[in-house]
């Protein structure tokens, strides 16, 4: 009858796995079978988050990082048992210990252990009365043991310092365990007198049994830690002897009192090890045999293999060594190593010791055949050890080197020196190669990792990569060979398997094109095979890598292949989630290739729950936008507009499904693009709503999310301003609110460009574009909107003027203001009033500044001509607001340099004419005279710089280019004379002037009866009538001068 | 000779035997049994079976049970294959149930009620296996459809309709599924008719129409259902509603609702638990919390994988989520499991 074990303490083995409650429960089930009534699982029906069970499941799956995160987030799960919550630090420690053990990265492993230690100490400190406190302390002791073991076993033969540290760790562990023993002994003694009814208080029974179990564990572990502390001492010092004696006493006591328990069996094993270390060979042999005499049971497999190793070492240590007996003992175990055990330390050691026995046998045997055979077996064993990371790896490598075997050479590779004869044989080899490929890949990755951390392992790195490559190439060769064999065992399933393996190895060997071809073949030829989809995905992945490596000329061809394979996978497995990634890839490829139609089609086919769909919709929106620009450039405005509509809908769909947390920089970009399209579609309200969205609106989120580009903020504010301005034109509503908003947005815009190298230029550029847009709108705006547009315009122009130092921009602002002001004046207005006056005044002030700075710094202006233009415009502006002195000064400056500038001459004459209108009569007549005859004599030439109307008319007469100026100046000549006459207090002189005015007109009219056109003709006619009235004549206008009827 | 005599006597007795079966309903009391969901078994003669309930005559009194009160009904004359197969099917051991049920020779079955029961348990077991990826869904759908057409008065009619909906849903035919589920609306049992609303809402949601589904869930939540099955249905509806909210981007509201359900969750109710954790996963996804979502779907995957559609759904989501936390190989494992356990899931 198979024996069962009353208590389990198996967790205390070399590997020191953390003890999970589940494992202990399972082990306690063995006790239950033996008769102890301990409930293995509690029946639960109350509401509860199954935290314990879930953590155990996560651990069993190797999802340690998620188990840790789950425990860290445990408060987010309602209904967690309070007892579990109280022990969450302990659970965390257990997971971290296990994670540390599984980790192959040294730093990560140490970090896990350190965290586990902290968590355990926190639990012990914070939960003094928790019933799991002893368990936590056991774990802490285990951790100390683990650290000591690592110091002794990892990194080659330990030096004195490492031994010292290890001893300290072991003694610390021993102390921890001994304290637990003391505490639990007291607790158990206290419980001994209690009468517990198992049916009424099963939990008390369970608690007592747990304490007993923990007590035994602590007892055994304390002994083990003491033994290990002794092992750290090289010399047979009294201290070493004392430690061994203490350990042995404890083991013997345990063995004698609990020989029917696993704790007792382990105590026997440890006792044997102490006896061996202290040279008591006979007792050690008896103890090892006692362990080996135990019945077969998986739980005892590890203690037994340790016993075998110990026994073999004893056999090899006698003189002469008993190699054959050692082989007889060890070989059956080596033949029976299970796949999961191949990497375990015990079995590595078993193979190592067995190899030593075979080598020893080879040494002493005389038969060459036997010698070769023994060496061959040893070599196989050593190769197996050399492939697993363990403390025996280096020694195995050295032994192999002494046998002339290259350690880098793969074992499977060695065995495949000749090609297999049958398909089955080939596939067995391939299985080995695939297994080893996995192992070597890991080794290569670890070496890469160490190189990255600065270790000088270049040679090892090269060798590891070479070994891996050789193995893959060999695997490929074998598979190709196998596929040519005409073997009856080759059913279609096996062939597909071989091809799938081939595709995989080609992929791993980075022979992507070949991998893609094979993978795609399987996917197409055997679509119902369970390997079809994964092979298709291999092909897809291969083409993706091929794309990465392709140069520009090859890229289109590779993209074609990629698209073809993805297309097939999507069609063949339309609902498979993995194939869905191919759908996504198709969209990306098409977008990347600017293949508008394909991208659109694939995107429509992409399921709505595809997590990348939002992102792809936004990318598609951008592609559509580009397409619309292309069409617009080609002159197909109608199609461009249609695509913009689609782009807006696509972008909107992509944005609508976003949540506040999922918005990123790309989302903001998408929103900005949508707003742009909306602006183009004359939807400023919608554009502003897009920019203002609480979820994805760039205006709202701009300070929470890192912008995609440095210019992004500025672009957002710029577009927002544009939208606001458009609203001003379109809405009859809240103008004041919009203006206020515009001011705020402008502040944002300035802030956005503040620290950018070319920020000022961009800022001015934005204002400039906006001002220009407004001006365009003003030209077509109805009168009722002109007023508010002008306000907005002035706001932008002022901002522009304040923010730029660029003379051309400033000049443009001034010109625009002046033009706008003039535009608001009627033809009969001499002086601006109201809004027009405000505009022209601003223009005048700005032009004065430009002129003043231009005079001082000629290089600031684009050239001399520009200064002349500015002064001329200043003359006009100043005149229109009645600042005649400034106007005249400015115009004089112009004429002093260029007297022939007719525009300036006209403007100056106008100044005198209009100025006269507001002067007292005595001064007015003088001013009119100057308007007519000129003024400002040049000190050198004595000629008037200001010509006056008379000279202007004279100089422009007969010139087709100045026809308009001629008729205008002749008109003003007559007008000035008429007005002067009206101002003249002397009636005779006045009469004379009026007659002269009439003559002025007659003279022109006689020569040019059309008077430059209908408008001018009418002006002349009206003036003539006024003169006629003043002269007391019949006011019949120009008819007076016509011999007959004279009309244009 | 002896043999001949017996045979002759048997031949003589045969018409009598047939006669006695024909009179059984009136002349002799039968040992039919009704096993209600709660309470003692009732033994008597089943006098009427309708799609909404079963009547059994005990002595001179008739007792009626609506279908929501019924666990199973057995009949005198049940073939042994049916007795065992029925129990196995009710325990969820469909493969073993089928082995028993396939042994029944329907031609030898004397009562139509028995035939209907035998056929239903066989077809429903096949359907359950097909849903779990171990059978032909299309064939199961076709056969169950024939059953529902032929046995419109069977007390299993609504169960058949629901299974037909499940099969359609598993094949990605959500509109078809909704049509089948709507058949349940005609039931006089409030919990069944409300179940129709729940199932239709679920298929709308699986079809991506979360907003439309909410009304259906709300209807169930607002209904006056006081039985334990009814309350459970309402909890399921709340879980469904939370998923719909998550689909609409209302992740936080969804999570709050689900956490309330979790506080009263009995983890032994695997179906409810699986759906609640899946809903929680959807809420976390809506909130962009991939890790949280994975933890939720892993609850379903590791603890409640017996709920076929919920498990397949959890695996499907995990295939998408694992790569986001840098674990593409786990995504491949989940995909492999999905393909192996539920081939053709979702059509």
Image (cartoon, rainbow, N blue to C red):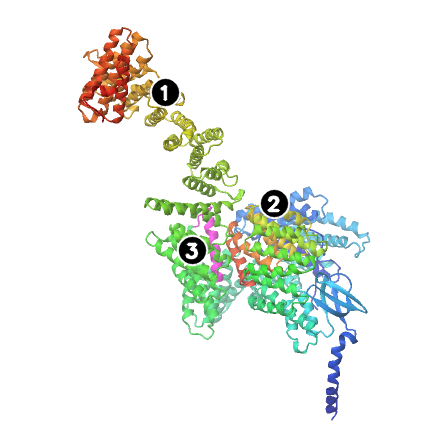
In 3D space, how far apart are the residues under numbered discs 1 and 2 (Cα atoms)? 64 Å
In 3D space, how far apart are the residues under numbered discs 3 and 1 (Cα atoms)? 87 Å
**Parent chain of label 3:** A
Q: Secondary structure at mark 3?
A: helix
Query: On the image, numbered disc 2 is attached to which residue?
Result: B253
Whichever of labels 3 and 1 marks the residue nearer the N terminus, that label is 3
Query: On the image, numbered disc 3 is attached to which residue?
Result: A465
Determine whether, in the image, residue A191 is placed left or right of residue A485. Answer: right
Question: Can residue A77 be seen in the rendering of this structure?
Answer: no
Instruction: Name the magenta segment's main secondary structure.
Output: helix
Assess whether mark 1 and mark 3 are in contact (beta carbons under 8 angstroms): no
Q: Is residue A1021 magenta?
A: no
Do discs 1 and 2 belong to a common subunit?
no
Residue A903 lies, with reference to residue A319, above or below; the image says above
* Label 3 CA crowd tier, 10 Å (few <14, some 14–19, many 20+): many
Q: Is residue A447 magenta?
A: yes
Query: On the image, numbered disc 1 is attached to which residue?
Result: A832
Region in magenta: A434-457
**Residue A1036 sits in quarter:** top left
């Amino acid at each position: 009858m198979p024996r069962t074990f009353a208590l389990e303490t198996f967790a205390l083995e070399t590997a020191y796995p953390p003890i999970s409650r589940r494992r202990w429960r399972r082990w306690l089930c063995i006790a239950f079978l033996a008769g102890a009534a301990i409930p293995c699982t509690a029946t639960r029906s109350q509401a509860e988050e199954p935290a314990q069970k879930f953590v155990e499941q996560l651990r069993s799956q190797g999802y340690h990082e998620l188990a840790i995160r789950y425990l860290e987030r445990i408060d987010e799960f309602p209904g967690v048992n309070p007892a579990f919550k109280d022990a969450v630090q302990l659970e965390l420690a257990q997971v971290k210990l296990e994670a540390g053990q599984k980790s192959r990265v040294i730093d990560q492993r140490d970090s896990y252990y350190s965290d586990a230690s902290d968590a355990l100490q926190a639990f012990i400190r914070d939960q003094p009365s928790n019933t799991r406190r002893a368990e936590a302390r056991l774990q802490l002791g285990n951790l100390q043991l683990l650290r000591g073991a690592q110091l002794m076993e990892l990194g080659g033969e330990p030096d004195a310092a490492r031994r010292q540290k290890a001893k300290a760790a072991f003694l610390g562990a021993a102390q921890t365990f001994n304290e637990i023993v003391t505490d639990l002994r007291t607790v158990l003694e206290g419980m001994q007198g209690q009468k517990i009814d198992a049916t009424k208080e099963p939990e008390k029974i369970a608690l007592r049994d747990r304490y007993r179990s923990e007590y035994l564990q602590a007892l055994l572990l304390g002994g083990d830690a003491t033994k290990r502390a002794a092992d750290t001492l090289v010399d047979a010092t009294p201290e070493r002897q004392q430690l061994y004696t203490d350990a042995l006493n404890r083991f013997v006591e345990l063995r004698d009192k609990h020989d029917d328990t696993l704790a007792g069996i382990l105590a026997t094993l440890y006792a044997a090890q102490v006896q061996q270390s202290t040279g008591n060979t006979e007792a050690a042999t008896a103890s090892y045999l006692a362990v080996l005499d135990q019945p077969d049971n998986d739980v005892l497999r590890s203690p037994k293999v340790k016993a075998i190793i110990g026994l073999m070492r004893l056999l090899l240590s006698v003189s002469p060594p008993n190699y054959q007996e050692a082989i007889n003992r060890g070989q059956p175990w080596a033949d029976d190593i299970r796949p999961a055990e191949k990497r375990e330390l015990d079995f590595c050691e078993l193979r190592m010791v067995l190899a030593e026995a075979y080598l020893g046998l080879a040494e002493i045997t005389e038969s060459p055949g036997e010698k070769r055979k023994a060496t061959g077996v040893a070599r196989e064993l050593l190769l197996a050890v050399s492939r697993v990371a363990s403390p025996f790896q280096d020694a195995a490598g050295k032994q192999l080197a002494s046998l002339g075997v290259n350690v880098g050479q793969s074992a499977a590779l060695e065995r495949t020196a000749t090609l297999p004869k049958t398909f089955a044989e080939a596939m067995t080899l391939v299985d080995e190669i695939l297994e080893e490929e996995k192992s070597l890949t890991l080794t290569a990755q670890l070496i890469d990792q160490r190189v990255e951390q600065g270790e000088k392992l270049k040679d090892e790195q090269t060798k590891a990569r070479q070994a891996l490559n050789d193995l893959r190439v060999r695997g490929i060769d074998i598979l190709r060979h196998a596929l040519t064999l005409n073997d009856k065992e080759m059913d279609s399933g096996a062939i597909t398997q071989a091809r799938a393996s081939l595709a995989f190895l080609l992929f791993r060997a980075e022979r992507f094109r070949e991998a893609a071809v094979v993978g795609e073949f399987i996917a197409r030829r055997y679509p119902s095979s369970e390997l079809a989809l994964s092979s298709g995905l291999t092909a897809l992945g291969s083409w993706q890598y091929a794309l990465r490596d392709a140069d520009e000329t090859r890229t289109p061809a590779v993209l074609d292949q990629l698209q073809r394979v993805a297309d097939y996978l999507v069609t063949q497995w339309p609902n498979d989630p993995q194939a869905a990634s191919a759908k996504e890839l198709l969209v990306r490829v098409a977008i990347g290739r600017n293949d508008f139609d394909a991208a659109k089609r694939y995107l429509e086919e992409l399921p709505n729950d595809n997590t990348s769909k939002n992102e792809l919709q936004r990318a598609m929106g951008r592609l559509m936008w580009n397409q619309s620009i292309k069409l617009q450039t080609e002159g197909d405005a109608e199609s461009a507009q249609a695509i913009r509509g689609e782009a807006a809908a696509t972008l909107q769909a992509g944005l609508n499904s976003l949540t506040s947390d999922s918005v990123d920089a790309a989302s903001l970009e998408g929103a900005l693009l949508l707003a742009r399209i909306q602006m183009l579609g004359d939807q400023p309200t919608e554009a502003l709503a897009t920019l203002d969205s609480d979820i994805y609106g760039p205006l709202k989120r701009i300070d929470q999310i890192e912008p995609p580009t440095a210019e992004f903020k500025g672009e957002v504010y710029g577009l927002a301003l544009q939208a606001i301005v458009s609203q001003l034109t379109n809405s009859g509503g809240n103008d004041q609110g919009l203006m206020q908003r515009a001011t705020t947005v402008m502040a944002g815009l300035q802030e956005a460009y503040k620290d950018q190298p070319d920020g000022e230029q961009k800022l001015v550029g934005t204002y400039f574009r906006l001002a220009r847009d407004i001006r365009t709108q003003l030209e077509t705006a109805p009168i009722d909107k002109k007023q508010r547009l002008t306000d907005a315009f002035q706001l932008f122009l002022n901002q522009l003027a304040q923010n730029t130092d660029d003379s051309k921009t400033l000049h443009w602002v001034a010109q625009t203001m002046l033009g706008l002001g003039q535009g608001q004046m009627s033809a009969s207005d001499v002086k601006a009033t109201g809004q027009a006056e405000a505009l022209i005044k601003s223009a005048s002030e700005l032009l004065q500044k430009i002129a003043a700075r231009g005079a001082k710094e000629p290089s600031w202006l684009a050239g001399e001509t520009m200064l002349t233009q500015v002064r001329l415009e200043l003359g006009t502006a100043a005149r229109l607001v009645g600042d005649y002195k400034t106007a005249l000064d400015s115009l004089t400056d112009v004429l002093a340099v260029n007297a022939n500038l007719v525009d300036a001459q006209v403007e100056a004459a106008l100044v005198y004419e209009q100025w006269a209108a507001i002067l007292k009569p005595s001064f007015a007549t003088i001013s009119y005279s100057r308007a007519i005859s000129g003024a400002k004599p040049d000190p050198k030439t004595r000629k008037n710089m200001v010509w006056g109307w008379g000279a202007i008319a004279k100089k422009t007469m007969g010139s087709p280019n100045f026809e308009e100026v001629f008729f205008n100046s002749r008109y003003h000549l007559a007008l000035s004379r008429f007005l002067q006459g009206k101002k003249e207090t002397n009636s005779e002189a006045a009469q004379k002037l009026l007659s002269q005015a009439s003559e002025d007109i007659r003279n022109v009219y006689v020569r040019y009866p059309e008077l430059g056109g209908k408008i001018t003709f009418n002006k002349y006619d009206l003036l003539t009538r006024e003169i006629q009235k003043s002269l007391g004549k019949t006011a019949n206008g120009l008819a007076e001068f016509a011999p007959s009827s004279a009309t244009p | 000779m002896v043999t001949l005599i017996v045979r002759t006597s048997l031949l003589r007795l045969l018409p009598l035997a047939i006669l006695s079966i024909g009179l059984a309903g009136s002349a002799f009391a039968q040992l039919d049994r009704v096993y209600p969901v709660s309470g003692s078994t009732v033994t008597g003669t089943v006098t009427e079976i309708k799609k909404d309930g079963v009547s059994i005559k005990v002595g001179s009194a008739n007792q009626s049970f609506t279908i929501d009160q019924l666990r199973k009904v057995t009949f005198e004359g049940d073939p042994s294959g049916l007795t065992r197969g029925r129990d196995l099917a009710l325990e969820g051991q469909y493969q073993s149930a089928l082995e028993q049920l396939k042994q029944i020779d329907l031609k030898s079955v004397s009562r139509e009620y028995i035939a209907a029961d035998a056929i239903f348990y066989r077809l429903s077991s096949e359907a359950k296996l097909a849903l779990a990826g171990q059978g032909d869904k299309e064939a199961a759908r076709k056969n169950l459809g024939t059953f529902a057409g032929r046995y419109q008065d069977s007390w299993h009619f609504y169960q058949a309709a629901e299974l037909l909906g499940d099969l359609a849903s598993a094949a990605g035919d959500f509109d078809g599924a909704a049509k089948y589920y709507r058949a349940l609306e005609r039931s006089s049992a409030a919990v069944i008719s409300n179940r129709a609303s729940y199932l239709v809402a679920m298929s709308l949601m699986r079809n991506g129409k979360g907003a439309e589904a909410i009304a259906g869930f709300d209807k169930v939540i607002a209904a006056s259902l006081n039985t334990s099955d009814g309350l459970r249905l309402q909890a399921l509806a709340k879980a469904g509603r939370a998923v719909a909210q998550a689909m609409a981007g209302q992740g936080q509201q969804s999570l709050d609702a689900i956490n309330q359900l979790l506080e009263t969750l009995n983890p032994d109710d695997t179906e409810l638990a699986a759906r609640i954790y899946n809903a929680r996963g959807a809420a976390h996804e809506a909130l962009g919390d991939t890790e949280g979502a994975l933890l939720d779907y892993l609850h379903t995957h590791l603890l409640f994988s017996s709920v076929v559609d919920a498990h397949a759904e959890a695996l499907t989501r995990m295939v998408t989520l694992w790569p986001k936390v840098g674990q593409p190989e786990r995504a491949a494992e989940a995909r492999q499991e999905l393909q192996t356990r539920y081939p053709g899931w979702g059509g």
